Amino acid sequence: MTVDDLDQVLEIEQRIYPFPWTRGNFRDSLDAGYDLSVLASAGQLIAYAVVMWLPDEVHLLNLSVDRAWQGQGLGRSWLLHLIDDAARRGAGGMLLEVRPSNPIALQLYRTVGFEQVGLRKRYYPAAHQTREDAIVMFKVFRG
């Protein structure tokens, strides 16, 4: 992902999330040197991911698939690619947070081997100026 992709990324972000990341969130991730990647079909951006590298693991900050492409296995394929890439590059595992109100994502993460390791209270913004907890999940790459 580059700065030139941000308009398309933000369009998807606003279509699929009630509380989308901002241009500043993505720009800060680019400036910090995180791994930001995009997937396109016929010149149109359809998915993207943000991965932050820690000393011995990676933190998946954002994995998103445009609504028109959801339900076709693209999110699973993209996640498996990110896992394979991180493992190949030496990470020992992947950490992520997910909303309890997102059962599709929870199921995806569980089916590829993520396990719940914690709960972050009031982590996400939610409707009516409330907050939603985050389920913290981790997948070990090597034993």
Image (tube, grey):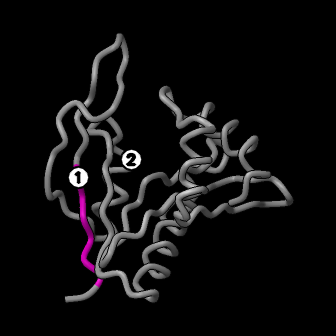
Q: Which mark is residue 104?
A: 2
| Residue shown at 26% from the left, 29% from the top | 132
10 Å crowding of disc 1: few (<14), some (14-19), many (20+): some
Give the amino acid at mark 1: Val
| Residue shown at 40% from the left, 84% from the top | 87
Say if the magenta span includes residue 109: no
Q: Position of residue 15 (x, y in %)?
A: 62, 32
Give the amino acid at mark 2: Ile
Please tell me which residue lies in front, 67 or 32. Answer: 32
In this rendering, the answer to whether 45 lies above or below 131 is below
In this rendering, the answer to whether 122 lies above or below 63 is above
Check the picture and name the quadrant holding the C terminus. Answer: bottom left
| Residue shown at 45% from the left, 86% from the top | 89
Q: Position of residue 37 (x, y in %)?
A: 62, 64
Q: Earlier in the sequence, mark 2 or mark 1?
A: 2
Q: Which residue is mark 1?
A: 136
10 Å crowding of disc 2: few (<14), some (14-19), many (20+): few
Secondary structure beneath dot 2 equals helix
In this rendering, the answer to whether 105 lies above or below 134 is below
Identify the magenta region. Answer: 136-141
